[in-house]
Image (cartoon, rainbow, N blue to C red):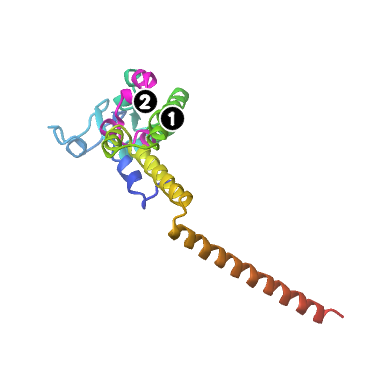
Amino acid sequence: MLDVCNPDELLALETLVPTEFRHGAYKLGKELDPGSSDRDVKEGAQLEVPLWIALPLAKMLMTNVKLPAVYSDRYRRKLNAGAECVSLKNRAPYFYEVGNRCNDELKDVELSGFLMRTFKTRYHELISKGLNTMTGEEILELHSKLSAEEQQLFEGGRLSTSETDRWLRGDSSISRFKMMRRKRTADHDTEERSKVGEDATKQQRQAP
């Protein structure tokens, strides 16, 4: 289900994917292909259209969706050779989201395995290593290789690591936060116990 509040998901659906039209489309030639001189899309036409258009048409058996070039055997070999061999930021910023969306239609078991292996490899070789001490220049270089999904994961890891380091150093703000949280929890527990006691008293009074 589409999450319209998630801008990354919306941007992923704007990715152009190769699409073969099994049937003609009236008055959509220039809309789908601005460089075309034809008003209509002819049967058998090969166009690149946004994912949000391609997938619904495929479900209606009007088109055949194909994978973008970054999922081809050539790129699979590169990605299998090592995480640093391919920069996904420019080639496929929503590599995993688009791959999985396409696979909802294609039902390609090999593609599912490839996406999983790629994520695991890049997580261990790029993201987890990047959580160690890095200079600003090294972080920028790493960002240039990561997809949007990987960047979010990396930044989330950096934030967690930073907060953990601050806690280990005894950062006062974190200590105050923990004390306030404990106080709220204690107050809540006291209130709950009070309610339970009141309920028990009422039940005793109502008992014959």
Q: Nearer the viewer, residue 149 or 127?
A: 127
Residue 195: % across, % down: 68, 74
Q: Which residues are magenta?
A: 76-98
Residue 170: % across, % down: 47, 54
Please tell me in which quadrant of the rendered image residue 154 appears: top left
Q: Residues within 10 Å of mark 1 (few under 14, many from 20)?
A: few
Label 1 vs 2, first from the N-terminus: 2
Please tell me in which quadrant of the rendered image residue 157 appears: top left
Residue at screen point 24% across, 27% down? 45
Circle 2 SS class: helix
Q: Residues within 10 Å of mark 2 (few under 14, many from 20)?
A: many
Q: Amino acid at mark 1?
A: His
Residue at screen point 63% across, 72% down? 191
Q: Answer yes or no: do the residues labelled 1 and 2 have beta carbons within 8 Å?
A: yes
Residue extending farthest to the right is 208
Q: From what the image shows, is residue 1 above or below residue 76? A: below
Verify whether residue 199 appears in magenta. Answer: no
Residue highlighted by disc 2: 83
Residue at screen point 13% across, 33% down? 35
Please identify the quadrant where the C terminus is shown.
bottom right
Compared across the picture, whether 18 is left or right of 40 comes to: right
Residue highlighted by disc 1: 124
Q: Amino acid at mark 2?
A: Ala
Please tell me in which quadrant of the rendered image residue 104 appears: top left
Q: From what the image shows, is residue 10 above or below residue 145? A: below
Q: From what the image shows, is residue 57 above or below residue 75? A: below
